[in-house]
Image: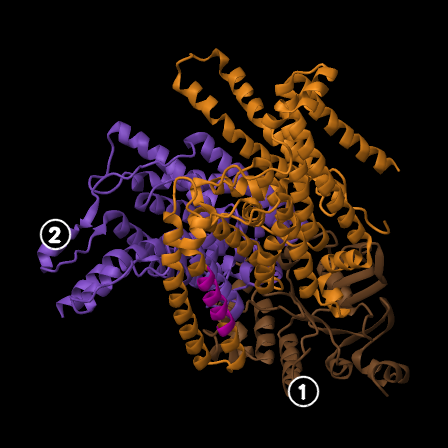
Amino acid sequence: MSYLSAKGMTGGYGSVDILHDCTISVEKGEIAVIVGPNGAGKSTAMKAVFGMLAIHTGKVTLDGEDITALTPQARVAKGMAFVPQTNNIFPSMSVEQNLEMGAFLRRDDINGTMEQVYELFPILRQKRLQNAGELSGGQRQQVAVGRALMTKPKLLMLDEPTAGVSPIVMDELFDLIIDIARTGLSILMVEQNARQALNIADKGYVLVQGENRFTDTGQALMNDPEVRRSFLGG
Amino acid sequence: MENWLNAFALLSNFVIVPALAYGSQLALGALGVTLVFGILRFSNFAHGDTMAFGTMVVILFTWWFQSMGINLGPLPTALLALPFGILFCALFALLSDRLVYRFYRAKRADPVIYLIASVGVMFVTNGIVRFIIGPDDQNFADGERFIIRARDFKEMTGLAEGVSIKLSQGITFFTMIIVVIALFWFLNKTRSGKSMRAYSDNEDLALLSGINPDRVVAITWIIAAALATIAGTLYGLDKSFKPFTYFQLLLPIFAAAIVGGLGNPLGAIAGGFVIAFSEITVTYAYKRFIGHLVPEDWEINGLIQLLSTDYKFAVSFIILLLVLLIRPHGIFKGTGV
Amino acid sequence: MRGALRNLTYFLIMAALIVLVGQMQSWNLALSILNLCIISAIMALGVNIQWGYAGLFNVGVMGFAALGGVAAMLISMPPVVEAWSAGGTGVALGSLTLIVTIAAAVFTFRSLAQGKLRMLALIIVIAVGYSVTRSIFDPATDAIERVNPAATGYLGGLGLPVLLSWPIGGLFAGGAAWIVGKITLGLRTDYLAIATLGISEIIVAGLKNEDWLTRGVKNVVAIPRPVPYEINLQRSEWFINWCAKLGVEPVTFSSIFVKLCYASLFTVVLLIVLYLSEKALRSPWGRMMRAIRDNEVSASAMGKNVKARHLQVFILGSMVIGVAGAMLTTLDGQLTPASYQPLRFTFLIWVMVIVGGSGNNWGAVLGGFVIWYFWIQAEPLGIWLMEQITTNMDAGSALRAHLIDSAQHMRLMTMGLILLLALRFSPRGLIPERTGHG
């Protein structure tokens, strides 16, 4: 069984279902990417996996354990971490305090983890006493990811991590995501920039109207003419 | 030269010293308002009456201690009663949260609904305070009255104008500094304090980080109640205790919090002093002050008072409006607007 | 249809309660409760226009009502000629310089670019204007206040029929609302709340301290009535004959008759305001208002100027409160600035609107009746309750005396509890807002 497995998720806001029998799974140390057109329910699928949206059908398991009924906070304790697309930092707190807050639930020594984060994102070490709200867009995203890493998660979920940053920063961020995956974490992310994302993905999911349309390895999807035509712009 | 010194002594006696004391009281009140705003995201109209409630408990304990002959010598007995006031006031605040506000938090109600609910709490608190201690003035200050008497000051310096500093003014300023240092230490250095700031900054992300919202809210109420009790007791020692006056303090306190930037603790302190100094400088009669500075044969007509003290609320109000017009976020950036 | 029946029942119960007071206590009391119920209902309608239609939280009801009260006094009292000759010119000149100062300040603000220069120029204009105004005003008002201070000591009014003051009171309140609204609307709700709280405190402070205008805490008494005086009725032949025919005692009946006259005048105003409010609520304007209230973002995205609409509705609501304030002072026959208490004039009205049903005019009217009735009856009820509780205590016990003394504060608590309970368990009120097409 996959490390994270979300099978047959159906649900949405109020009485309207946005997800229809949607299935997503991630293996250990793998990068899985959800792509699709606007309004396809990508972020909704992500929220459903993290428990921020109630599903009435389907089952989510993590490392074989059923977590369908858990609150997001409880899922954090189980080793999942989520980086929202916007409002993902504490703007009036310093970078270091942002990281500390990420480790709020931990009672052990967090200095080692913080050191690892600073090694991944050297710029944050420089700016560690500065307020996170004063940083540039790309640096904020690094703070956001760093905060999520502070819980020592086994699965990191990123909701459009490259939204609103410049192309150069975007490339840097993708490189960093690969680096993170190399440390053994599983990564599940939603991306608007489908081409670059599938490039680094071990597995890709193309969602359309809340349903799985295509599921394959990132490379295979990139080579699939139909996927290219409909979703990657030729 | 001596004229200048006399003028300065006069100004210190009637403007600077009282404004420092009043500013400290407003700052403590505004800190409570701004903390509740930052964490619970509503303007707590019951804060003035919470101050009255805490002060009432302090007064009752003070009377009890006095009747048993317990006192602090030169210091007011009220300081001994203060911890009890804080305790009861915190319990009261937690109770009102449990019975009133928690329900709306679970529903994620609109901030204006909290505002109305706080008006209801204000009514009830006001009723309880009047019921227990009555609507009249209560005097509970004891101990020494002055740190420096005007007469002693004159003898010491040989100036014609004296500066007197009341003990209550000294205690107020001193307590304010200690409380502010303790509060900032708490907010910046402790785990609970940092979790409060995180919650205030970004509630959803705080939840994602595993911060327990109920704990944050409870701590906030306890601190707000403590600040309210301290501010109320100091105000009562310095002036007098009357429930309606405490309700009226809402306006300058809110003005202070908004001027400083709602949700910003540093701003609340600055705002408190801005309001206090403006209120007192504008309502002070400068006749004697100018008399020291101009040649003696000049005659000064009138009191040279910009605004009668009856309109002291107008000062808070006008400053409030000016800030809203020019800098809606306040002097320091708040979470407002 | 069931809703209509239920609402009718509510109003019938309310009528029965007032009749009950007439039967059990006295008809005089019942009618004075009725009159204040009607005035409260109009104030509640004003607040409902602001809150129910547009979601604006006005905590300055007291101030707007007080402005209406001032209007009643200024319109109807005879002018004090001596005071006018003593300080009339000074006051007129002072007002003129005040207006010139404000105009100059606005002109400076508009014609200079933002920066230190503008700030400086503005401060100089205001400082000079203020001191000139004060130097003209102060001697004039002092002179006025010296004119027979025991009886007058103020300028008096215009000596016009007091009924005229009701619309004028509305205009006064509307003007104040315009100033406050212009500055604070468009910001957070909290700011409007604080600002309205502030303006109402200042208005009442002005009433208490500007003796040359309002006599301050010395009160203005004997404001002319729009209805006959009891003493005249008791002397007029037709009235005595009428009493004889009805078999009632003229002294009591004259006072009942006067109250009935007031009640009919007030009812006319209530019906007009209610009719206009209902008409407005169902008009495209009212629908737009509610659309803005329910979703400000999408309404402004559709090109609605939210701030301008809010200003409109804020002024209209305040005007209604001002009218009610003028009516209240007319009924009292005197202007007593010290009687303006925020708990009675602001927060009580809010309880009425929340309990009655925010967004529904009939709800606001019902709320005004119900809450005023209980506000009046809560005090004797509280005292009675306390007497029951303390009946077994020693007659001389301090606790007993304290409890009975404090019974009057019970009603603050009761009102707070009613507000909290209504907000929690019946947030839509006794008569809920009609949603959808109505």
What mark, if any, has residue B152 been given in the picture?
Answer: 2
Q: Main secondary structure of the magenta part?
A: helix
Look at the image and give the colour of chain A. brown
Residue occupied by mark 1: A167
Graded by Cα atoms within 10 Å as few (under 14), some (14 to 19) or many (20 or more), the crowding at tag 2 reads few
Q: Residue C287: which quarter of the image?
A: bottom right
Residue A192: % across, % down: 75, 78
Q: Nearer the viewer, mark 2 or mark 1?
A: 2
Q: Secondary structure at mark 1?
A: helix
Residue B17: % across, % down: 27, 57
- Residue at screen point 58% across, 37% down: C416
CA–CA distance in space, label 2 to label 1? 74 Å
Q: Amino acid at mark 2?
A: Asp
Image chain in orange: C
Q: Amino acid at mark 1?
A: Pro
Which residue range is magenta in the image? C92-104
